Image: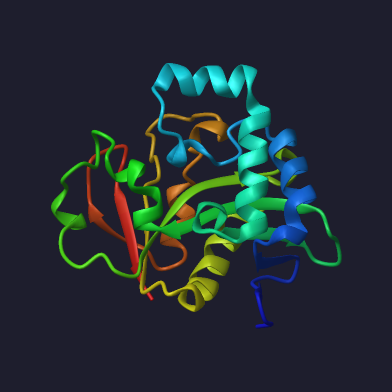
Amino acid sequence: MTEGGARVSSTIAVAAAGPEHLAGLEALFEAAGTPCYCRYYHFEGTNNEWLARCSDGQGENRREFAAALAARTDEARGVVALAQGATDVIGWLKVAPAAAVAKAYERRLYRGLPCFAGDRAGVFLIGCAVVHPRHRRQGVATALVAGAVELAPAWGARALEALPRRPREPVSDEELWTGPASAFTRNGFVEVHTFEPYPVLRRTL
C-alpha cells in the first residue's frame, strides 16, 4: 500500500482519483461513450433535461466534473485504475458519501428500504463504474472495488454500499453502469436486500 494508492493485482494499480488524473479520466469517458461525466446524481433537473444535457451539452458535465475533481469534493470522489507501468486511466469507480448521492436512494426501487434505516454516518455508495472498452472482462472492475475497500476508510467510510444490476439475460457492458454484481461479491460484499435484478449489496469496513 502506498499513500493514495493500492496495488491490487500484478497488472492493475488503483489510486484515489485526483486532479492529476483529469486528462486520463476525460479520455476514458470519451472512449467509453459516457457523456454524463458521472454527474447524474448531482443534476437537479428533469429526466428530459438530463437527456438533453448529455446529448447537446456534455461540455457542462465535463466542466462540472473537472471543477469537482480539482476541488477534491465528494462529487468527484472515487478511485481510478491504471495499468501497471502506464499512466493511462483504464477504469473509474465513483465512491462517495451516501449524503452526497442522495438522488440514488430516492429512486423508486430504493426509496424507504429498511436496509437503509438507522445511522448512515460513514456509509459510502459506489455510484458508477466505467472501464475502458479495450480493458473490459480483464478484472478491472473487481480491482477497482478492491481498491475502494482499501482506500475508503481513509475518507471516513465505515461501510460501502452498491446498487448493481444483476440481469438474467446477457446485456451490454454499458447497461452495467453501477458495476457488475460479481465485482462486489468477490470483494466480500453481502446482499442486504433482494429484488431482482436490482439487489442491494454492502460491505462493512
Q: Quadrant of the C terminus?
A: bottom left
Tell me where residue 158 sits by quadrant: bottom left
Does any portion of residue 137 appear in the rendered image? Answer: no
Instruction: Tell me the residue at 55%/47% (across/down).
Output: 129
Residue 203, compared with residue 111, is above or below; it is: below
Tell whether 80 sits left or right of 186.
right
**55 or 135: nearer the eye?**
55
Where's residue 186, x and y in %? 46, 63
Instruction: Tell me the residue at 39%/22% (across/down).
Output: 46
Does any portion of residue 56 appear in the rendered image? Answer: yes
| Number of numbered labels in the structure image | 0
Residue 165, compared with residue 161, is above or below; it is: above
Where's residue 138, x and y in %? 67, 52
Q: Quadrant of the N terminus?
A: bottom right
Tell me where residue 37 sits by quadrant: top right
Tell me where residue 41 sits by quadrant: top left
Residue 59, compared with residue 20, is above or below; it is: above
Instruction: Tell me the residue at 54%/73% (across/down).
Output: 151
Where's residue 48, x and y in %? 44, 16
Tell whether 107 sits left or right of 17.
left
**204 or 61: nearer the eye?**
61
Residue 135, compared with residue 152, is above or below; it is: above
The colour scheme applied to this rendered structure is rainbow
Instruction: Tell me the residue at 33%/62% (across/down).
Output: 202
Where's residue 150, x and y in %? 53, 75
